[in-house]
Amino acid sequence: MATTPSSVPQEADVEILFNYLGKRYEDAYLDSPNLQDFVRNAISTLAPHSQVLDVGCGTGKPVADMVARAGHSVHGIDIAEEMVGIARGQVHGSEACPATFEKADMRTYMPLSPGAIDAVFAVYSLFQISPSDTYSMVFRFGEWLRPGGVLVLGFTPSSVLVEGQGTYDPLWDCVREVEKPWMTRVTKETLLSEERWRKVLEQAGFRVEVERSFRFVPKDEQHKPEEVHSLIQARKMEVDSLCGPFPLPDKHVVLSDLDQRAWMALQHRIVIEEWQDPILGPTAEDQRILGLGGGLRAFLTASQVSGKEATQSLLAYPRNLPFAENEFDAVYSFMALDTVPNLQTALSELARVTDLSSPTASITIVQAAPDNEVTRLLNTLSLPLNSESESGQQYSSHQGYLLHLAKKVLSECGFGSISLHRVRAKYPFPGHDPVFEAAEAVAAPWFCGGKNLAEAKKALAPHLRNLFIEHPGVLKNDLAMLVARPTQN
Ligand SMILES: C[S@@+](CC[C@H](N)C(=O)[O-])C[C@H]1O[C@@H](n2cnc3c(N)ncnc32)[C@H](O)[C@@H]1O
C-alpha cells in the first residue's frame, strides 16, 4: 500500500488516485440504493429540461446518468481525466438536453452561466480539498445556482472519527488531514460534522430540506470496510451569496483605529487572479473618477486595467464628500466601508456625487468575499483592536452586510442595475518566514501600536501555518465587487 508524502500537493494525489481507480471506483460504489433513491427524489423536484452541474462527477454514474435519463441537461466536471473519459463514453444526453463532461478542478472552475444553474450535485467529491476550500465551495455553489436552485451534497461526517484521527481546525470548525487507507492508497481528508455542514449551508444562504445517513459497504475485493454516507438536499434562499455569511447582523459595527500605512502596504500585495468582464463598468478616456479607500491604484494595476487614474482620491470617507453633486462619472470604493461611522450617509454621498445622466455612470464597491481568508483570520481574534481603546472593540467586520446595505441604498438612489461579482485574488508572502510576514501584514493595520499587535500575531500564527499547508506563502483574498449603474446604461 503506497503512502502519500505530505509534501505532494493534494490535487496531484487526487488526480493520480482517481485516474488510477477509474471504473474500479464505480464497481465498488455504484450499487447504493439509498444514494440512488435520494438522487431520484432530488431530480423529481426539478422543472423539465433543467441545467444541472455534477461536481466531481467521477464516471458519471449514478448521478449524471440519472439526471440525463430524467431529461435534463447535465455538465460534469472532474479533476481526473480518466473519470471524465469514462463518463463521456457512458452517459448520453439528447440534442435538446446534452450530457457534457470536462476535466476541471472545482476550486478554479467557473461555469459559463453562473447564477443560472438549476441544480448542483457534489456527491462524495469534497473530501480531498482543504477546510478553507470546503467552506468556499459551498458559497461558490450558491453563486452558481439560480435563486431557488437545489444543492445536493454527499459526504462522510466527522462523527465517524475515533480519538487521534485528524486534527481539529478551529478556524473552520472541522477536522483536517484525516489520513485513512482507502481503495489501495492512504488519503488525506477534510471532514465536517453534520451540524457544521448545516451551519455552512445556512451561512451560504441555503435552507436544508432533506437529510439522510446510512451505512454502506463498498464492493471491492481489497477494500470493504463499512462507511457512513450522509446526504443533504438544500435550496438556495438568498439571492446574493456574496452578501453572506447569513444570517446578516442587524447593524454595522464600525471599525476604527486603522493604520493607513500598514493598510496600504497590505493592499499593495494584492494579486488579482481572475477577473470577470465587464467588471469595472463602461469606461471612457475622459471619465471623471473618484477613488475612495486609497487602494484603487493598486487594485487597477493588479487587475491590469490601464488608462484609468482617479481624478480625485480620498484615503478615508469624510462625513460628507467635499464634491459637488454629479461631479463624477465613476466612483470606486475599495475596501473602505469598514471604518465609516455612518454607512447610510456615506452610501448616499456616493450616489450624490455620481452623475446619473453620464453614459458611463457607475459606482463600484469592493469588499471582501464571505469566504475571504484574511477576514476569517481577523474575525477569530478575540482581542480588543487597540490596547488603549476603552471600548475594548474587537474586529468583527461583516463584509456582506456592507454590500447588502449598499445594494439597498444605491437602488433607492436611482441605481436600478446592481450586480455582484467575485474577484479571485490573493496576497503572496514570498519571504523566508511567510507565517511571520503574513501575521505582521494582516494584523498591523488593525492592531496599531499597542501590545495587542504582538498578541494578535501570536494568535494568527497557528492558523497561518495550517493555511500555508494548502497554499504555501499565499493567503486567499477573494473579493466581492458590487457594480451599480442607472438602469439605462
Ligand atoms: C469519491 S468520487 C465520487 C464520484 C461521483 N460523484 C460519485 O458519486 O460516484 C470523487 C470524485 O471527485 C473528484 N474530485 C476530487 N477533487 C476534485 C476537485 N478538486 N475538482 C474536481 N473533481 C474532484 C475525483 O476525481 C473523483 O472522481
Image (cartoon, rainbow, N blue to C red):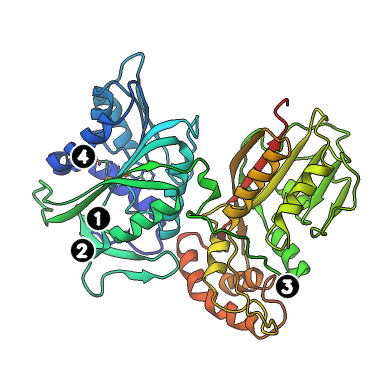
Q: Which residue is mark 3?
A: 257
Q: Which residue is mark 2?
A: 160
Which tag is nearer the camera, tag 1 or tag 4? 4
Mark 1 vs mark 4, CA separation in Å: 15 Å
Indicate the amino acid at tag 4.
Phe
Image quarter where the C terminus lies is top right
Looking at the rendered structure, the secondary structure element under dot 2 is helix
Which tag is nearer the camera, tag 3 or tag 2? 3
Q: Which residue is mark 1?
A: 156
Mark 3 vs mark 1, CA separation in Å: 44 Å
Q: Which residue is mark 4?
A: 38
* Label 4 with label 2: CB-CB less than 8 Å: no
Looking at the rendered structure, the secondary structure element under dot 4 is helix
Mark 4 vs mark 2, CA separation in Å: 21 Å
Mark 2 crowdedness (10 Å alpha carbons): few <14, some 14-19, many ≥20: few
Residue 195 rendering spot, x and y as whole percentages: 31, 60
At 74% from the left and 46% from the top, the residue drawn is 300
Residue 294 rendering spot, x and y as whole percentages: 79, 56
Which tag is nearer the camera, tag 3 or tag 1? 3
Q: Is residue 23 left or right of residue 123?
A: left
Q: Is residue 163 left or right of residue 8?
A: left
